[in-house]
Image: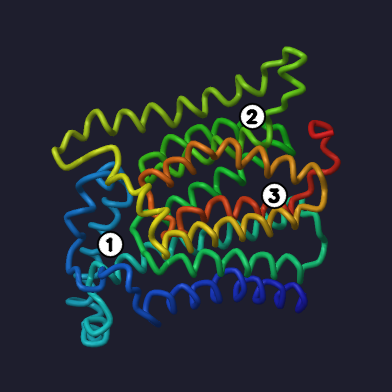
Amino acid sequence: MLKKNDEKINGFLFVIVLPLLLFAMSYYGFESSYTRLKTSERPPDFLFSSVYAYRVIPNYLSVQMTELVYYSINGPFSFFKDFLTKNGTPFYHGLFLMNSFFFVLCSVLLNKILQFKAAFSSVDIRRIVHLMSIFFIVITQYAPTNCDTIALFCYLSGVFLTLKYLHEQKKQYYYILIVLIVVSTFVRETACLNIAFFAAVFFNLKDLEQRKYQSVLKIIPLIIAFLIPYLGLRKFITLEEATFVEGFYIDRNFSSPFNLAGLIFAIVVLYFIYRLCIDKENRLIFQKYIFFSLPYLIMITLVGLFWEVRLFLPLILTGIIIAFHHLKQLQRFS
């Protein structure tokens, strides 16, 4: 009984408390030269214009969290007002609370995923892998936004559902995944990567050669689940400032030392993660995932900035999950 209690306490400290402390350090321990969100009293106007206008759920939560923090520091928690005012604005504190909540959920999900059909039995190894994943999330927060941790939580939820569906073959996981993609498209375009992961796991060229199209037919509803809300948002949100993309930065990506450093960072990390895939089945899944993620990578190259390595984060975490997931005995990859 005491041993079980110790395991629960250790799990709580490792999965929730430690990641939360690291996250707080990244928001309050040092200041980013990339953003100036600490000086914004209210959600900035740019969140409701350009491409950010389509991220409906994070924007709504940002407004609500800002109001909640503003009410709290001027009401029941007024004794903290001086301290909080010196270290940020209601918007920034609300951003931290919102992001830290979904970050903790990401940590819990990662813990569940790494426990599920893991290719290793050692708790120590699992914790090292989990801690490595957490550090990757934390270091990308030098460019904090109101949508990345929510989008990451939605994405990891999709990864978990895909793996559950793979191993247990229960259709409810597939249907929940479809609903999740619809909802997460209102968060960020990262929702499309759930399609890439599902396709990497289930798509098999041998099936096409044998004229078996079941894997393709399973992918189509996921694509539709992404496209309908994605295109619907762009039809109904018709602000003059709202555009499909914020700008085209391909020239800056290959001319700026910072952006080139971000690209090299992503390539090196993904390379080493690929090297961790000991079994050929895992390497095959990883290769297919990168292939199906090419539309996302192309969009990053065209309209994103490589220096914002948070854009590569879903691929990095997925690579870690694939490398340490037990796939060897699945006949589909033989």
Residue 117 at x, y = what percent? 76, 50
Estimate the spatial distance between the alpha carbons at disc 3 and disc 2, rounded to whole Å. Answer: 22 Å
Give the structural element (helix, strand or loop) at label 3.
Answer: helix
Give the residue pinned by disc 2: 171
Give the structural element (helix, strand or loop) at label 2.
Answer: helix
Rendered image coloring scheme = rainbow
Near-viewer residue (208 or 65) = 208
Q: Which mark is residue 144?
A: none
View extreme (left): residue: 240
Estimate the spatial distance between the alpha carbons at disc 1 and disc 3, rounded to whole Å. Answer: 35 Å
User: Is the residue marked by circle 2 packed among few (<14), some (14-19), or many (20+) residues within 10 Å?
Assistant: few
Which residue: 38% across, 74% down? Answer: 27
Q: Is residue 212 left or right of residue 20?
A: right
User: Is the residue marked by circle 1 packed among few (<14), some (14-19), or many (20+) residues within 10 Å?
Assistant: many
Q: Is residue 274 left or right of residue 248?
A: right
Kind of residue sitting beneath label 3 = Ile
Question: What quarter of the picture does the N terminus occupy?
Answer: bottom right
Q: In the rendered view, would you say 2 is above or below 163?
A: below
Which residue: 77% across, 14% down? Answer: 210
View extreme (front): residue: 255
> How many discs appear?
3
Give the residue pinned by disc 3: 322
Residue 248 at x, y = what percent? 31, 45
Which residue: 17% across, 77% down? Answer: 74
